[in-house]
Amino acid sequence: MSKFEMKTENNYMIVIKPDVKDWEIQVLISIPKLDVLKTGLDGGLLEVVPRFNNFMGRDCVVFCDEEGKLKGLKHNNVAHWLWEQSYGRSITNDYLVGPIVIIVGSSSFLAQL
């Protein structure tokens, strides 16, 4: 995690899974297709995580599994902490579970999602 340095000219897809120390990181040349996003969520239904629009100082859009809590997926403590950093305060009325997918890029790139 600490070795990851984002280049401002690149767009990225980052998958953070619960209890996994290494993140899956890909440089994106184009907007990922729906099946790629769903694969990052282990096949889950996409839901945008509200108020999670900044990752390491870059604009982002974050997806989680819409049915993750119903499925009993594990809490994703790292993702939840990152969400709180983006929001700028503690989030106690909700929590993130299962894998999350973070798409990082320019505002024009993210607008295509």
Image: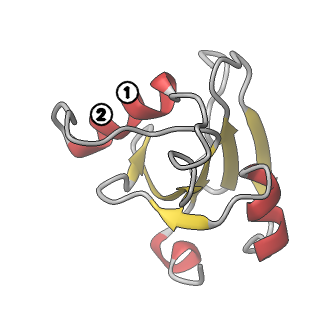
Residue at 54% in and 61% down: 66
| Label 2 element class | helix
Q: Is residue 61 left or right of residue 9?
A: left
Gap between marks 2 and 1 measured at Cα:
6 Å
Residue topped by disc 2: 85
- Residue lying farthest to the bottom in this orientation: 112
How packed mark 2 is, by other alpha carbons closer than 10 Å (few <14, some 14-19, many 20 or more), is some
Q: Quadrant of residue 28?
A: bottom right
Q: Is residue 2 left or right of residue 62?
A: right
Q: Is residue 28 left or right of residue 16?
A: right
Residue at 39% in and 43% down: 57
Please name the amino acid that badge 1 sits on.
Trp
Q: Is residue 54 left or right of residue 14?
A: left
| Quarter of the N terminus within the rendering | top right
Q: Nearer the viewer, residue 82 or 29?
A: 82
Residue at 63% in and 26% down: 18
Q: Nearer the viewer, residue 105 or 41?
A: 41
The location of residue 64, given as percent across then percent down, is 55, 53
The location of residue 97, given as percent across then percent down, is 52, 38
Check whether the beta carbons of the residues at disc 2 and disc 1 lie within 8 A of each other: yes
Q: Which mark is residue 81?
A: 1
Please name the amino acid that badge 2 sits on.
Gln
Look at discs 2 and 1 and give the one toward the viewer: 1
| Label 1 element class | helix
The location of residue 44, given as percent across then percent down, is 70, 58
Residue at 46% in and 23% down: 77
Q: Is residue 10 above or below residue 89?
A: below
Q: Nearer the viewer, residue 56 or 48?
A: 48
